[in-house]
């Protein structure tokens, strides 16, 4: 799986992760799949796909700065900075040293 992500084949990686997503029932596994898929959606410019994927995960796991940051990035790219700012603030509160936010 990692090879698909690092060799530039984002489309194949997205398909593989989407196929695995229903199987990721363990919390840690589900979070990893969602985080990876959201990151690929952002790389591919599929910003509108991120909120539908990440928002339900944040309902289950609200203290995930990486997911908050990805959702904020999607909203910013979709032209909704008013939705992005509070998410970034929350993510920075949870992880103030995270340079990726």
Image (spheres, rainbow, N blue to C red):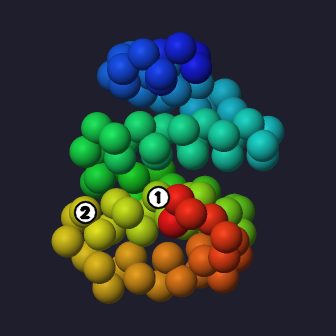
**Image spot of residue 25 (x, y percent):** 74, 37
Q: Which mark is residue 70?
A: 1
Crowd tier of the residue under label 2, counting other residues whose Cα lies within 10 Å: few below 14, some 14–19, many 20 or above: some
Alpha-carbon span between mark 2 and mark 1: 11 Å
**Image spot of residue 11 (x, y percent):** 33, 22
Q: Which mark is residue 97?
A: none
Q: Quadrant of residue 23?
A: top right
The residue at the point 38 percent across, 63 percent down is 73
Give the residue pinned by disc 2.
77
**Residue 52 visible:** no
37 left or right of 64 in image: left
77 left or right of 35 in image: left
Closer-to-camera residue (39/33): 39
15 over 101 or under it: above or below: above
Quarter the N terminus occupies:
top right
Crowd tier of the residue under label 1, counting other residues whose Cα lies within 10 Å: few below 14, some 14–19, many 20 or above: many
Closer-to-camera residue (100/42): 100
């Amino acid at each position: 799986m990692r090879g698909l992500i690092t060799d530039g084949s984002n489309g194949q990686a997205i398909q593989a992760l989407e196929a695995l997503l229903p199987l990721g029932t363990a919390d840690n596994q589900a979070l990893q799949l969602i985080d990876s898929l959201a990151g690929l959606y952002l790389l591919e410019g599929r910003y509108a796909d991120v909120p539908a994927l990440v928002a339900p995960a944040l309902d289950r796991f609200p203290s995930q700065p990486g997911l908050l940051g990805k959702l904020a990035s999607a909203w910013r790219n979709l032209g909704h900075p008013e939705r992005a700012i509070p998410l970034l603030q929350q993510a920075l509160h949870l992880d103030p040293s995270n340079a990726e936010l």
